């Protein structure tokens, strides 16, 4: 895997300027306590102002289009931002305008989670749901208070049936390792990428604010590295070994 530099401030081209500083959490903090690291990252994310969030969401969409992340993609997985996550909705709306098949995750019921079945389903936005107006039928809030699109009779797909998946992150490092919220839903959904040597779907793009980068992200044997990292400052491709 190619080593990436930190995702600091950007130039007009969307690339980080050489020598620009980036505030990262030192390795000593990363290695001590994963729970403490998550708490630190939540605080960093919450410190982003509303105006900065709006600007960051728009810049995400511009960078994704500039790097042709939506080009030729038939099925694209997104997410509904929650808990101060970076706003991916401008990018989702751009994909819908381009005619892409856009999918949102559905968290499994508590009984399934208790039985060890944590893999996410994904449902395609269709009809009036493409407006993202949650007053229309088919929208529900799950137990984490995150909107899901689950109308009656909708066809559900697994992550392996998507071509590209934009994933929320609590943190990340320059090797493409992602720190999630700790629920294990994406780990379970992407387990096939570890068990099948030549399986390369979906392409994984982690999405976060640049301040969520850490010096080194803790990772476990079941973790799957990202193919790319998208922040409001840059898009960087990660090369898998």
Image (cartoon, helix red, strand yellow):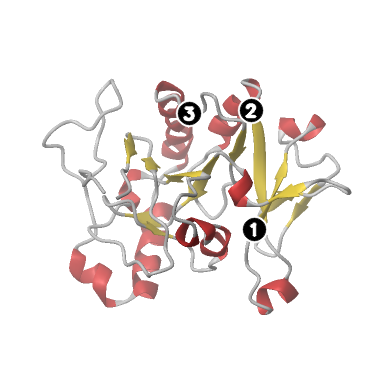
Question: Against 153, is 52 above or below?
Answer: above
Query: Circle 2 — which element?
Result: loop
Q: Return the residue at label 3.
A: 61
Q: Earlier in the sequence, mark 2 or mark 1?
A: 2
Q: Residues within 10 Å of mark 3 (few under 14, many from 20)?
A: many
The residue at the point 33 percent across, 38 percent down is 237
- Tell me where residue 68 appears, x and y as whole percent: 45, 24
Mark closer to the observer (3, 1) = 1
Residue 100 shows which numbered tag? 2
CB under 8 Å between callouts 2 and 1? Answer: no
Quarter of the figure with residue 40: bottom left
Q: CA distance from mark 2 to mark 1?
A: 20 Å
The residue at the point 56 percent across, 29 percent down is 73
Left or right: 117 in relation to 208: right
Q: Residues within 10 Å of mark 1 (few under 14, many from 20)?
A: many
Q: CA distance from mark 3 to mark 1?
A: 25 Å
Q: Return the residue at label 1.
A: 120
Question: Against 133, is 144 above or below?
Answer: below
- Tell me where residue 215 appears, x and y as whole percent: 22, 58
Q: CA distance from mark 3 to mark 2?
A: 14 Å
CB under 8 Å between callouts 3 and 2? Answer: no
Q: Earlier in the sequence, mark 3 or mark 1?
A: 3
The residue at the point 22 percent across, 50 percent down is 23
Q: Earlier in the sequence, mark 3 or mark 2?
A: 3
Query: Circle 1 — which element?
Result: loop
The residue at the point 28 percent across, 21 percent down is 13
- Tell me where residue 1 appears, x and y as whole percent: 26, 49
Query: Circle 3 — which element?
Result: helix
Question: Against 170, is 69 above or below?
Answer: above
């Amino acid at each position: 895997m190619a080593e990436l530099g930190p995702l600091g401030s950007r130039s007009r081209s969307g690339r980080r300027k050489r020598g620009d500083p980036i505030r990262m959490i030192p390795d000593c903090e990363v290695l001590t306590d994963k729970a403490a690291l998550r708490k630190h990252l939540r605080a960093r994310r919450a410190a982003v102002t509303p105006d900065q969030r709006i600007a960051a969401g728009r810049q995400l969409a511009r960078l994704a289009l500039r790097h042709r992340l939506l080009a030729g993609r038939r099925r694209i997985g997104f997410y509904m931002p929650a808990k101060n996550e970076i706003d991916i909705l401008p990018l989702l709306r751009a994909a819908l305008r381009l005619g892409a098949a856009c999918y949102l995750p559905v968290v499994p019921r508590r009984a399934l989670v208790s039985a060890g079945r944590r893999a996410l389903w994904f449902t395609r936005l269709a009809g009036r749901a493409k407006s993202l107006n949650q007053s229309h039928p088919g929208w529900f809030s799950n137990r984490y208070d995150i909107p899901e699109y689950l109308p009656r009779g909708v066809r559900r797909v697994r992550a392996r049936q998507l071509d590209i998946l934009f994933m929320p992150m609590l943190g990340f490092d320059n090797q493409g390792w992602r720190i999630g919220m700790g629920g294990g839903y994406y780990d379970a959904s992407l387990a096939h990428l570890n068990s099948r040597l030549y399986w390369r779907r979906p392409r994984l793009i982690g999405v976060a604010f640049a301040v969520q980068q850490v010096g080194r992200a803790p990772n476990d044997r079941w973790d799957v590295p990202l193919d790319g990292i998208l922040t409001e400052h840059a898009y960087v491709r990660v090369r898998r070994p």
